[in-house]
Amino acid sequence: MKKILVVLLVLVLALGMFGCGGNAEEPKNEDETAATIGLIVSTLNNPFFVDLKDGAQAKADEMGAKLIVLDSQDDSAAELSNMEDLITRGVDLILINPTDSEAVGSAVAAANEAGIPVITLDRSANTGDVVCHIASDNVAGGKLAGEFIIDKLEGKGNVVELEGVPGASAAIDRGQGFNEAIKESDIKVVAKQTANFNRAEGLSVMENILQSQPEIDAVFAHNDEMALGALEAIKASKKDIMVVGFDATDDAVAAVKAGDMAATVQQLPKEIGAAGVEAAMKVIAGEKVDKSIPVDLSLVTE
């Protein structure tokens, strides 16, 4: 009787294991079935690009995609290394915010060779095969800033232009729009120098310019970080100089509301990031997307 009971118990256990899926296919992990998107950001030391990353992450979470974010720290060599890392990981698509529009060509070419689609965000790539580019119209934004300064200075005066990272399409386009706007006026650019989109550099560059240029009426900075740095230098000099920035970061908008900065051109970095993920998911699904996807901008004033 004991032997019979033991045999029956063994059979029941075996059937139970089979019924629970002994030979059935194991359920797949959600992360294994979700689309995987790589996001390479030029620098996460800039709040604008932190917002861009946050917008992309929120949209990826909403759409059930896995997002891998890598920071290039404004270094083209690190950018290429990040691209190679994502290629090795076998991501489905790569979103990239280039450090330099020319230098990024090598990174884009590496993704092209690996057969991984690429979408550029905020800054374009001069070479390589890119599915689409998502950004605000930086030329139009530069014109907005120029027209605002013309209006406030009544068409004449001395202006300093703080430029972004040399070679970055955003810096080139913003400068182009600004200079196109003021060329028909009597406004003169008395100093033009890069501060690499960096607040600390904006401060030091502006300090030097204040020593060499006695008459300055306004500053146009290609981004808010440089504008806020320049503002610190101007406050220390006790001079009354109008400052206009670009990006409408939280710090800059607060400075405008406080009356310290005159204006900032508002981009929507979270929308750029979100639009990037939306476009990525369409491309991964085999759908077509527009070659260029614009994101609105406007001028924020007191």
Image (cartoon, rainbow, N blue to C red):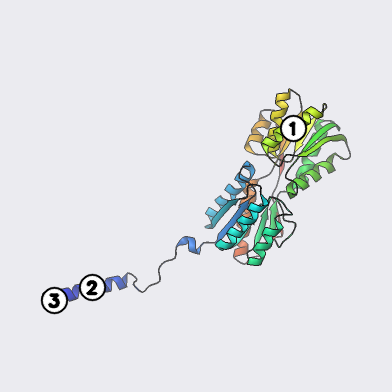
Rendered view: 247 above or below 59: above
Pointer 1 residue: 206
Mark yes or no: residue 31 visible.
yes
Which image quadrant: the C terminus? Answer: top right
Mark 3 vs mark 1: give the one in front.
1
Q: Quadrant of residue 280?
A: bottom right
Q: What is the spatial separation of the Cα atoms under label 3 and label 2, in whole angstroms?
A: 14 Å
Q: Earlier in the sequence, mark 3 or mark 2?
A: 3
Query: Crowdedness of circle 1 by 10 Å Cα count: few (<14), some, many (20+)?
Result: many
Q: Nearer the viewer, residue 154 or 5?
A: 5
Q: Earlier in the sequence, mark 3 or mark 1?
A: 3
Instruction: Give the amino acid at mark 2.
Output: Val
Q: Where residue 107 sits: x, y (%)?
A: 67, 58
Instruction: Give the amino acid at mark 3.
Output: Lys
Q: Where residue 298 sits: x, y (%)?
A: 72, 42
Residue 12: numbered disc = 2
Circles 1 and 2, Cβ within 8 Å, touching? The answer is no
Which image quadrant: the N terminus? Answer: bottom left
Residue sitting at x 50%, y 64%: 33
Q: Is residue 57 left or right of residue 263?
A: left
Instruction: Give the amino acid at mark 1.
Output: Met
Q: What is the spatial separation of the Cα atoms under label 3 and label 1, in whole angstroms?
A: 93 Å
Q: Where residue 165 sits: x, y (%)?
A: 72, 45
Mark 3 vs mark 2: give the one in front.
3
Residue sitting at x 70%, y 30%: 231
Pointer 3 residue: 3
Q: Where residue 187 sits: x, y (%)?
A: 86, 34
Q: In what element is the residue under mark 3?
A: helix
